[in-house]
């Protein structure tokens, strides 16, 4: 029983990371029907920039926890910038020329370039990210969880809720939703929809960079850390639906938990199978995702 | 206020407008009528920047606006209630209206009193007040039409373009829409109204243009067009 609970808790932590990255896919898909296949690399760059920043701050005799907090705005700003660059170099032309596949190739290519860049700057070895919190696991009724893992869950939820509140409350957030609803009509409101798309890319990469510094302290940090996460989050976005905020959280949890359960009860070799089977089932029976809805449209 | 000269526009290689010239003077209601496919909607789309004109000039308040993107033209005071309503279906009625005032909230146009204007819209369209928290996608066709008009008015526009506000509505609602247009006219709103209900449009407008195959065939004071035998036979027949 305890083992089951333990597996579920660990699954939730991994699942929330998948959820945040998938949330990033949603942000750009909503406004532009395109997404950044280099999302995993955005996460990796965020983690590595975070690593350099936090090591610098710790070198200035700042405590690990304070250094971590000070590092966050730097990483978030970097993520925003990196996402804007991806949109500008990889996506804008494709959207303008209404190219169906141009953005796919371009964002994959940019992802590879970012990975090579990271290997040259930070090396090929996995690096250790200083933990801002004690690494000793806490124990609740026999279920062990690291303080940083609790932060992952809370941080992921906080980010998604913050974006949701922005979208609902501020006029700029409403402009983003309007662009997602109907780009031409949003233009008639005086909204520069091209800028909104750039912004959604910036926000998407920011979410990934944030996920990067959330997982970094509990995993290894390095140029290859993003690829698998990015791919799994893509599966989550398909399972949950590219249009549903709840969907990515639930989809992330489903994938995270099934992976853990399969890894323990069957074999770690089959860890990825149930998630992929689920992906295939969803694509066959409900292509808009478990929580995706067909757009409401009245003409 | 709004002056168009030799406007040529279309979609891709298909040219729809073959040189349109028309004028909408300050505070006047001008109507553009004609049969389906004559190019009325295309004219409005070219005016508001939804499509880029191939040639010709568009002056709004003395400044050239042709070739500008839609959002720039909106920022200069052109509001467009487009064909098919195009409300934002996943947003509540109130948010749709606030987005109409996006440029005012973001300092691109004078802010004025946005909450008073919101109230004014609810007075003009009481149905919208009842439905204000409902998602726009769940409104009836008539309510969506009112929302599209109200959203355009929230710009506090210099010129209002209305594309077939009566489309798909019940006769009673059509009457209501025309009553609203008449009220806006009394308030000296500068308007260009595109309509298939030619008789009703000429009944409320100051001036009319008749479009045929992408060209203006006849134009003149609305009164005079109503009594023009050719216009009557073609557009004001029993079919309407």
Image (cartoon, grey):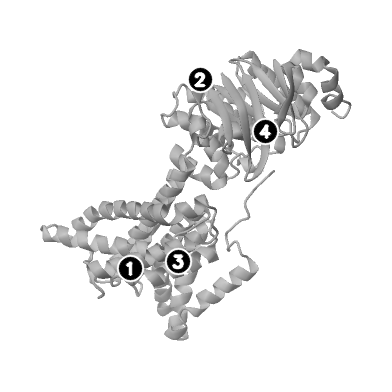
**Nearer to us in this view, B178 or A10:** B178
Q: Chain of mark 3?
A: A
Instruction: Judge whether B228 appears above or below B41 on screen.
Output: above
Q: Which residue is mark 1?
A: A115
Q: Nearer the viewer, mark 4 or mark 3?
A: 4
Instruction: Judge whether A139 appears above or below A203 on screen.
Output: below
Q: Which residue is mark 2?
A: B62
Dot 4: element: strand
User: Rounded to the nearest whole Å, what is the CA distance between mark 3 and mark 1?
Assistant: 18 Å
User: Rounded to the nearest whole Å, what is the CA distance between mark 3 and mark 2?
Assistant: 53 Å
Q: Which residue is mark 4?
A: B18
Label at residue B1 = none
Q: Nearer the viewer, mark 4 or mark 1?
A: 4
Labels 3 and 1: the sequence-earlier one: 1
Dot 3: element: helix
**Nearer to us in this view, A160 or B229:** B229
């Amino acid at each position: 029983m305890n083992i089951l609970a333990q597996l579920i808790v660990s699954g939730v932590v991994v699942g929330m990371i998948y959820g945040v990255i998938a949330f990033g896919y949603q942000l750009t898909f909503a406004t532009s029907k395109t997404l950044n296949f280099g999302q995993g690399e955005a996460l990796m760059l965020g983690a590595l920039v975070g690593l350099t920043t936090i090591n610098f701050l710790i070198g200035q005799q700042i405590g690990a926890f304070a250094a971590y907090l000070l590092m966050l705005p730097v990483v978030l700003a970097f993520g925003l910038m990196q996402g804007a660059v991806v949109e500008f170099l990889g996506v804008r032309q494709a959207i303008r020329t209404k190219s169906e596949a141009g953005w796919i190739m371009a964002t994959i290519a940019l992802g590879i370039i970012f990975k090579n860049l990271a290997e040259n700057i930070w090396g090929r070895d996995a690096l250790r990210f200083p933990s801002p919190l004690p690494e000793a696991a806490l124990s609740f009724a026999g279920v062990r969880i690291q303080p940083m893992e609790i932060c992952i869950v809370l941080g992921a939820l906080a980010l998604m809720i913050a974006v949701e509140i922005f979208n609902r409350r501020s006029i700029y957030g409403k402009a983003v939703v309007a662009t997602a609803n109907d780009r031409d009509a949003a233009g008639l409101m005086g909204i520069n929809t091209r800028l909104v798309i750039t912004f959604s890319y910036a926000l998407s990469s920011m979410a990934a960079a944030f996920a990067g510094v959330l997982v970094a302290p509990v995993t290894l940090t390095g140029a290859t850390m993003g690829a698998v996460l990015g791919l799994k989050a893509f599966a989550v976005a398909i399972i949950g639906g590219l249009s549903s905020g709840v969907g990515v959280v639930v989809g992330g949890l489903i994938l995270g938990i099934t992976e853990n359960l399969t890894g323990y009860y069957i074999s770690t070799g089959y860890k990825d199978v149930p998630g992929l089977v689920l992906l295939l089932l969803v694509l066959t029976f409900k292509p808009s995702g478990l929580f995706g809805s067909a757009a409401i449209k009245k003409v | 206020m709004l002056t168009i000269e030799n406007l040529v526009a279309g979609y891709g290689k298909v040219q729809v407008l073959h040189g349109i010239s028309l004028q909408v003077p300050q505070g006047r209601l001008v109507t553009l009528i004609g049969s389906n496919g004559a190019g009325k909607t295309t004219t409005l789309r070219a005016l508001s920047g939804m499509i880029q004109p191939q040639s010709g000039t568009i002056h709004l308040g003395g400044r050239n606006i042709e070739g500008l993107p839609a959002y720039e033209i909106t920022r200069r005071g052109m509001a467009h209630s487009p064909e098919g309503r195009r409300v934002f279906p996943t947003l509540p009625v109130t948010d749709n209206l606030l987005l109409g005032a996006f440029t005012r909230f973001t300092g691109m146009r004078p802010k004025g009193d946005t909450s008073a204007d919101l109230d004014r819209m609810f007075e003009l369209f009481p149905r919208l007040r009842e439905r204000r928290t409902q998602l726009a996608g769940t409104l009836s066709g008539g309510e969506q039409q009112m929302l599209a008009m109200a959203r355009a008015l929230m710009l506090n526009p210099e010129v209002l373009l209305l594309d077939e506000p009566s489309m798909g509505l019940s006769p009673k609602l059509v009457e209501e829409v025309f009553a609203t247009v008449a009220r806006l006219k009394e308030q000296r709103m500068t308007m260009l109204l595109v309509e298939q209900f030619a008789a009703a449009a000429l009944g409320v407008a100051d001036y009319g243009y008749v479009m045929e195959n992408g060209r203006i065939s006849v134009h003149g004071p609305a009164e005079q067009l109503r009594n023009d035998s050719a216009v009557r036979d073609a557009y004001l027949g029993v079919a309407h």
